Image: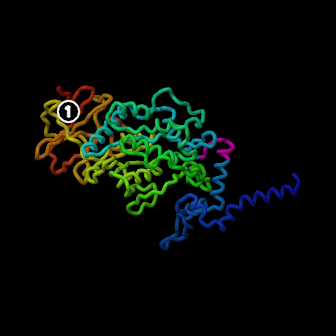
């Protein structure tokens, strides 16, 4: 190589090395805005009159966060991986064909890998049935619905390396069991599958506003309520949507995605200061009839305005566990529970909050309870006790019921528990399918004794002082 060429190469190389540092003088918070977090401040040599022994590690962090062109370099690396090597730089994002992006945690559902046991499928349906019965007793309509994963509906753009198995996945298994129950189910999978138009976004994990309208109409129809309010409205397309998946790939300067906005002027009003669609609770006053309580996730971000317009009052909640007990307190006439397909297992991991229904145990068998409290856990609530625990695996079949026989100074009452395994409260690393959970209107001071009755496979078991005993009806 000739000397002039060596000099030019050396100068260019040094400029590349120096450019990020030199550009720090002109970088005024661009990285912070792009990454949406507070960056570290320049470390102090001394703190409270002492030498800061962590100075060099803090300085290293400061340099890495404030390095000039940092965001551009990160995006350049992402571009090289996606465009040249067809590889996602983000583990949670799957690169599909024709510019489609998918959320990686949905891959198992796409491949029909049943991650929820058959027993927990039954547990979920039994829980929903108990919630439905509770709402009916209060004069409210209950509707359950599942927002399908994007690749469940539009899997034709998924990479070919993800092979689908010839078996039923979580959603299909759940719907099959639901069909044999009295739970009202709004089938969004069928509704979207019957549409020729793509109603999810290419670079976001959710449906667009037009898809949200279809979901709203399907739920309203399942509720037996009129859904003609938005019939025939048009939509305006704008490329200004802050898409979640593409933002995960590119830390900054990601192109906005296309969104279809309804050409409609809403008349409802919000109560309080609603800062975003992600708010844990949104309350509205509309011009329709009835009072709605909707439990929702991020798929409700584009759907809740349609419902807010349709009811006289509405509450949209992302609080977990679901506060079903508010149906009594607030007098809701319609209750909707919406959850995305990929999170179905959550329904088996945390019981809804509502007073456990009482049952007539004498119709099952005559039982004289012992004075020894059952083995389990009790947590105090504002209205009583939260009782939860595990049932021995060896006595359980594919489905089971759990009744708490509770003795107080006023006598004995029988409460049915949700067949739910409280994973967090039981400090379990994985979700199990042999739990129970109930909220009972009894305080610790009122409680004399408590026993468990389990009904499964046509048999009835009672826990006594030592072990579980099978009793005859």
Q: Residue at x 60, y 56 (%)?
A: 252
Residue 197 appears at what percent x and percent y? 55, 40
On screen, 364 above or below 414?
above
Q: Secondary structure at mark 1?
A: strand
Q: Residue at x 39, y 30 (%)?
A: 176
Q: Quadrant of the C terminus?
A: top left
- Please state which of residues 441 and 137 is positioned toward the viewer in this rendering: 137
On screen, 191 above or below 10?
above
Q: Residue at x 11, y 47 (%)?
A: 409
Decide if residue 342 is in sight here.
no
Q: Does residue 470 belong to the magenta stretch?
A: no
Task: Residue at the far left: name it.
Answer: 410
| Numbered range of the magenta stretch | 80-89
Residue 280, by quadrant, is bottom left
- Please state which of residues 56 and 183 is positioned toward the viewer in this rendering: 183
- Please state which of residues 333 and 158 is positioned toward the viewer in this rendering: 333
Q: Residue at x 14, y 37 (%)?
A: 370
The residue wearing badge 1 is: 462
């Amino acid at each position: 190589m000739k000397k002039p060429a060596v000099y030019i190469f050396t100068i260019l190389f040094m400029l590349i090395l120096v450019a990020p540092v030199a550009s720090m003088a002109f970088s005024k918070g661009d990285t912070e805005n792009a990454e949406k977090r507070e960056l570290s401040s320049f470390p102090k040599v001394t703190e409270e009159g002492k030498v800061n022994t962590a100075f060099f590690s803090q300085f290293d962090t400061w340099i890495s966060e404030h390095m000039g062109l940092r965001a551009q370099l990160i995006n350049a690396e992402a571009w090289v991986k996606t465009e040249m090597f067809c590889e996602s730089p983000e583990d949670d994002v799957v690169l599909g064909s024709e510019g489609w992006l998918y959320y990686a945690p949905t891959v198992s559902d796409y491949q029909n890998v049943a991650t929820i046991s058959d027993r927990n499928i039954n547990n979920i349906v039994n829980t929903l049935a108990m919630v439905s019965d509770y709402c009916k007793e209060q004069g409210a309509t209950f509707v359950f619905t599942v927002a399908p994963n994007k690749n469940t509906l539009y899997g034709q753009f998924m990479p070919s390396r993800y092979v689908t198995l010839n078996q039923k996945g979580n959603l299909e298994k759940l719907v099959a069991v639901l069909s044999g129950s009295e739970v009202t189910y709004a089938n969004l999978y069928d509704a979207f599958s019957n549409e020729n138009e793509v109603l999810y976004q290419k670079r976001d994990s959710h449906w667009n506003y037009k898809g949200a309208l279809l979901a709203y109409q399907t739920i309203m129809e399942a509720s037996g309520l009129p859904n003609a309010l938005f019939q025939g409205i048009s939509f305006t397309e704008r490329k200004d949507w802050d898409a979640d998946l593409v933002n995960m790939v590119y830390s900054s300067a990601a192109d906005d995605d296309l969104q279809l906005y309804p050409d409609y002027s809403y008349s409802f009003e919000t109560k309080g200061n609603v800062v975003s669609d992600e708010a844990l609770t949104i309350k509205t006053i509309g011009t329709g009839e009835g009072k709605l309580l909707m439990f929702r996730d991020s798929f409700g971000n584009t759907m809740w305005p349609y419902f807010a317009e349709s009811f006289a009052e509405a509450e949209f909640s992302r609080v977990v566990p679901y506060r079903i007990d508010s149906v009594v307190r607030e007098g809701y006439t319609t209750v909707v529970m919406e959850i995305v397909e990929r999170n179905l297992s959550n329904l088996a991991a945390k019981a809804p909050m509502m007073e456990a229904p009482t049952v007539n145990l004498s119709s099952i068998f005559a039982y004289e309870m012992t004075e020894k409290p059952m083995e389990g856990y009790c947590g105090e609530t504002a209205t009583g006790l939260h009782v939860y625990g595990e049932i021995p695996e060896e006595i359980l079949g594919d489905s089971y019921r759990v009744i708490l026989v509770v003795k107080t100074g006023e006598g004995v009452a029988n409460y049915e528990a949700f067949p739910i395994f409280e994973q967090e409260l039981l400090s379990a690393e994985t979700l199990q399918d042999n739990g129970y959970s109930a909220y009972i209107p009894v305080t610790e001071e009122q409680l004399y004794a408590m026993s468990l009755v389990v009904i499964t496979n046509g048999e009835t078991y009672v826990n006594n002082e030592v072990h579980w005993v099978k009793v005859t009806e």
